Amino acid sequence: MAEEITHDHRRAQRIAKASLGIGLALFAIWLSATFIPALLWAAIIAIAIDPLYARAEDRWPGGRKAWLPSIATLLIALLVLAPLTIGVVEAAREARTVIHWLADARANGLAEPDWVRQMPFANEISGWWQDNLATPEGTALQWDRVRGSVLGGNSELVGRNLLHRSVVFAFTLVALFFLLRERDGFVAQLKIAGTRALGSSGDRLGTQLIRSVRGTIDGLVLVGIGEGAVMAVFYLIAGVPHPLLLGLLTAVAAMIPFGAAVLFGIAALMLIGQGAVGWAIAIIVIGLVVVGIADHFVRPYLIGGSTRLPFLWVLIGILGGVESLGLLGLFVGPATMAILILLWRDYIEGAARTAEIPVPAPD
C-alpha cells in the first residue's frame, strides 16, 4: 500500500513538473516571440558556416572563446552590409538624375519615344501616351497617382519595418556570437536532449536537419549568386544601366524560385527605354534559359540530393515558407519538409516491418 502511494506521488510529481515545464516554455516563447526570427537566423548561419568554423577552431584552438567568434560574426555582418551599402551609394548617385528628370517631365511632359512605334498595338499605346504623358498636366497627374498609391500612408509603415529589421539583424549577430562561442556545449546538450526525447531517431533527425539547411543554402544562395553573376555579364554586354547593381539584385531575387524573372523584366524595360528592343528580347530569353537550367537541374540535385527529398516537396517548402515567414522561410520550409518526410519514412518502414511488407528505397 505504501509503495502504491509512493508511486502515485512520484507520478503526480512528474505530471506537475512536466506541466510546469510546458507552461513556462510557452510563456517564454510568448515573451521572446519578437526575437525568435533572429535566433532562427543565427542558428541557420551557424549551421551553414560550421564546417569552416570547425576548421578554424582546429587550427587556432586558443581563440574559441574570444576572437574566433568575434571575427566570424564581423565577417557575416560585412557580408550582409557591404552589398546594402553599395546599393545605397548607387541609389544616392542616381537620385539627383531622377529628381531632375521628374522635374523636367512635370514641367514639359514626356515626349513619346521612338521605340513605342515598334511595339505591338503601337497606335493604342501612342494614343494613351499622348493623352496621359505628352503634356505637363498629364505627366503631373500620372505622377501624383503613382506617388499617392505607392507612398501614401506607407512612409510610417516603411520606417517602422526598417527599424524592426535592423533590430532583428543586430540581435541575430549577438545570438550568432554566443552560438559560436558556446558551440560545443550547445551541440552536446542538443544531442543528449534529442536522444532522451526521441531515442535513436534523435541523432538522425538532427543530421537530416543540418543536411537540409546546408543543401538549401547551396541550392538557393550559391545558385542564386551564380545566376546573378551570369546575368551581370549579359547585362554589361547588352548595355543595361548599372549592370553590376542589377546583377546583385538578380542574385538576391534568384534565391526565390522564379524571382529572378522580375529583374529580367526590369532590365528589358530599361533596354526598351533606350530603343534596344532586340537586346531586351535577348535578355528575357537568356534569363529564362539560365533560370530553367538552375531551377530544373542544378537546384533539384543540390537540395534534393542532400535531403533525400523529392523536389516537389522542396518547392512546396520553399514557396510555403516564403509566404508564411518571408525570407526566413526559404530555409525553414525545406528543413521542416525534410524532417517530416524522414518521420513519415520511419513510420512506413516500421509498419512494413510489422506486417512484413517490402518497402521500396527512396529515390
Image (tube, helix red, strand yellow):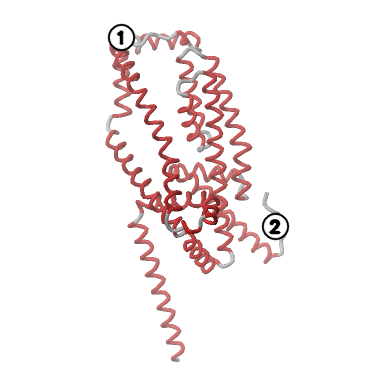
Question: Horizontally, is 242 left or right of 285 in the view?
Answer: left
Q: What residue type is labelled 1?
A: Asn
Q: Which mark is residue 108?
A: 1
The image shows residue 104 at horizontal and vertical percentages of: 31, 13
Q: Name the residue under label 2.
A: 359
> Can you tell which quarter of the image residue 20 is in?
bottom left
The residue depicted at 44 percent of the width and 11 percent of the height is 124
C-alpha separation, residue under disc 2 versus residue under disc 1: 74 Å
The image shows residue 194 at horizontal and vertical percentages of: 52, 64
The residue depicted at 43 percent of the width and 81 percent of the height is 10
Question: Horizontally, is 239 left or right of 164 in the view?
Answer: right
The residue depicted at 30 percent of the width and 24 percent of the height is 147
The residue depicted at 43 percent of the width and 42 percent of the height is 326
The image shows residue 199 at horizontal and vertical percentages of: 56, 68
Which one is in front, 348 or 240? 240
Q: Quadrant of the N terminus?
A: bottom left
Circles 2 and 1: CB atoms closer than 8 Å: no
